[in-house]
Structure formats: C-alpha cells, structure tokens
Amino acid sequence: MRSLLLNPPFRRRTGNIWRYVSGVLPPLGMGYIASMLEREGMDADFIDAPAENLSIDLLPRRLGDKKYDLVGITATTTMFPSALASARLIKKLYPRANVILGGVHVTA
C-alpha cells in the first residue's frame, strides 16, 4: 500500500496580515505518522507544499505518475480552504484512494 501525507499549499491573500508572513513551520506530526507507516511496512511519501513553495496548480506535476491508496492531508484553521481544495484535487486524480483530513482544525 502506498500512502501520501500532504501539508497543503498555503494561499497568501492580499489585504491581510498573512501576506507578510513567510515563515514555514515543519509539520512534525506528519513526519511522525510517515515514520510509523514506514515502520509498519507501508510506502509513505511526504509533501510539504508550503516549504516547497508549491501552489495547488503545481501539485499534480509534483505528484507525477505515482499512484496512492491512502492520502492524509493536514489542516490548521487558516489552511482549511486549501486543504479542502487539495482533497478535491487528490480525489479527482486518485478516485479510488482513501483521503483523510486531519490536523488541529478538524480535531477542534
């Protein structure tokens, strides 16, 4: 089983404070999940789109021709719209994949 863990692209909007914020915090929780999946014998790819400066439009190219059975996407409250857009794109690219949304927004 091949899995993908995705920290979705961050959409900067003009007109608010986020256009000035350019720091990237590593999604350590997703790294922990990836290591656990690999320990259990699964292939786990990890894409940190904000760190790679990927937009939603560039995501299909970054995914390449790999096929995934399981995709986990993280979401903070500010990232939720992007996470949802990423989930829709992933489901279009991999209709048979199980897509799981997690993170602090979903948990709260």
Image: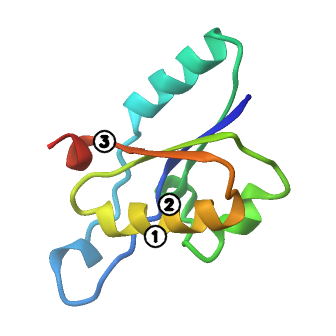
Q: On the rendered image, what quadrant is the N terminus found in?
A: top right
Nearer the camera: disc 2 or disc 3: 2
The picture places residue 30, in percent across and down from the top left corner, at 45, 33
Q: CA distance from mark 1 to mark 2?
A: 5 Å
- Mark 3, Cα crowd under 10 Å, few <14 / some 14-19 / many 20+, is some
Q: Amino acid at mark 3?
A: Gly
The answer to whether the residues at label 1 and label 2 have Cβ atoms under 8 Å apart is yes
The picture places residue 82, in percent across and down from the top left corner, at 40, 67
Residue 61 in the image: above or below residue 97: below
Residue at the limit of the structure toward the bottom, as seen here = 15
Counting residues from the start of the chain, the first of labels 2 and 3 encountered is 2
Camera-side residue of 55 and 75: 75
Residue that numbered label 1 is attached to: 85
**SS assignment at label 1:** helix
Residue 49 in the image: above or below residue 69: below
- In the image, is 12 to the left or to the right of 51? left
**SS assignment at label 2:** helix
Residue at the limit of the structure toward the front, as seen here = 96
The picture places residue 80, in percent across and down from the top left corner, at 30, 62
Camera-side residue of 62 and 67: 67
Camera-side residue of 88 and 104: 88
Camera-side residue of 12 and 5: 5
**In the rendering, which numbered label is found on residue 99?**
none
**In the rendering, which numbered label is found on residue 87?**
2
Residue that numbered label 3 is attached to: 103
The answer to whether the residues at label 2 and label 3 have Cβ atoms under 8 Å apart is no
